[in-house]
Amino acid sequence: MELVFYIAGAVAVISTGLMLTRLNVVHALLYLIVSLLGVAVVFYVLGAPFVAALEVIIYAGAIMVLFVFVVMMLNLGAHEVQMEKQWLTPGIWIGPVLLASILIIEVFCLMRGTAPDLSTDASGPKQVGVALFGHYLIGVELASMLLLAGLVGAYHLGAHETRKPEIQHDTNTDERRTAASGNLVLAGTDQSSRTS
Amino acid sequence: MFSLGLTSLLVRRNLIFVLMSLEVMLNAAGLAFVVAGSRWHQADGQVVFLFILAMAAAEVSVGLALVVQIYRRFRGLDVDKLSGMRG
């Protein structure tokens, strides 16, 4: 159990260091996922399986999906296909796959052995739930308010800029069409008045 | 891990890397909480980790929306380019 803990911690630290030295964002994201999985294995070994599951689901699931979406949004260009070809060369996968396979071997060893006894421990999922919704209830409410504010803020920041140019573009083309008195060719060639 | 994230936050000049190192720092702080909670057999450490998780989710959603907005305005993710943003 001690050995598994130290190996998982070493995997997490090594993959974090590799993440910070990558020049490419997608490679860094791969190493970051491996780092989060290593931290999740550390949590499981420490006797906190609930937190380990949450770490995998929220961090490695939701937050990484957000990062990947933003990276893909920012790379909309002409050289996108070439860049993806360059990213997906098989040499890149060796490092994260190696570290992740170490973690998988550890998890299998843990499954074959005895599971950590949660009934006597004072920090099982049940105790966490009781403390969370009993003693820390105001914190739960504050966290829900924070998440709501984050949701509204992200929607506002993300949707504000996309809608304005479209409306502007439509009114511009309509104005130009009426100004050119129905001559669509003349309206299309007027590039100087377009603000984009 | 916290010091690794802090170093990267100071060194890197790409906004996505800055956000990722923020994630690493929050994760390291949560790890410290859980380790302390399991050391003294208290459930409080895991509760605080849940709060850190919720805060990280909210922070990263707002941060990535800001990144998209900055990329549209400035055509790039260089932090030094933004240093002229005054008033």
Image (tube, coloured by chain):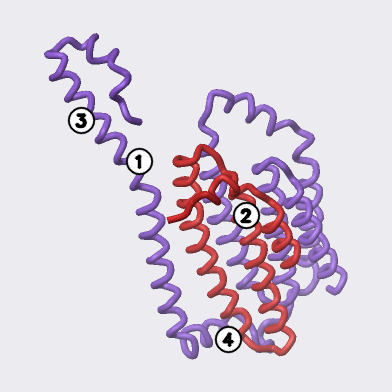
Residue at left 41%, top 79%?
Answer: A141
Residue at left 28%, top 24%?
Answer: A193
Q: Are marks 1 and 2 on the same chain?
A: no
Q: How many marks?
A: 4
Q: Chain of mark 3?
A: A
Q: Are marks 1 and 3 on the same chain?
A: yes
Please name which of the two marks, 1 or 3, marks the residue nearer to the observer.
3
Residue to which mark 2 is pinned: B18
Residue at left 39%, top 60%?
Answer: A151
Could you tell whether A176 is left or right of A132 in the image? Answer: left
Q: Chain of mark 2?
A: B
User: Relative to A109, does residue A94 appear above or below in the rendering?
Assistant: above
Q: Label 3 crowding class (10 Å Cα cut-off): few <14, some 14-19, many 20+?
A: few
Report which quarter residue B2 is drawn in.
bottom right
Residue to which mark 3 is pinned: A171
Query: The N terminus of chain A appears in which quarter of the rendering?
Result: bottom right
Q: Which of the numbered marks, if any, corresponds to residue A183?
A: none
Mark 4 and 2 residues: CB-CB less than 8 Å, in contact? no
Q: Which of the numbered marks, if any, corresponds to residue A127?
A: 4
Residue A32 seen from this side: yes
Q: Earlier in the sequence, mark 4 or mark 3?
A: 4
Q: Amino acid at mark 2?
A: Val
Q: Amino acid at mark 3?
A: Thr
Residue at left 68%, top 53%?
Answer: A32
Report which quarter residue B10 is drawn in.
bottom right
Q: Which of the numbered marks, if any, corresponds to residue A162?
A: 1
Q: Earlier in the sequence, mark 1 or mark 3?
A: 1
Q: Chain of mark 1?
A: A
Q: Are marks 4 and 3 on the same chain?
A: yes
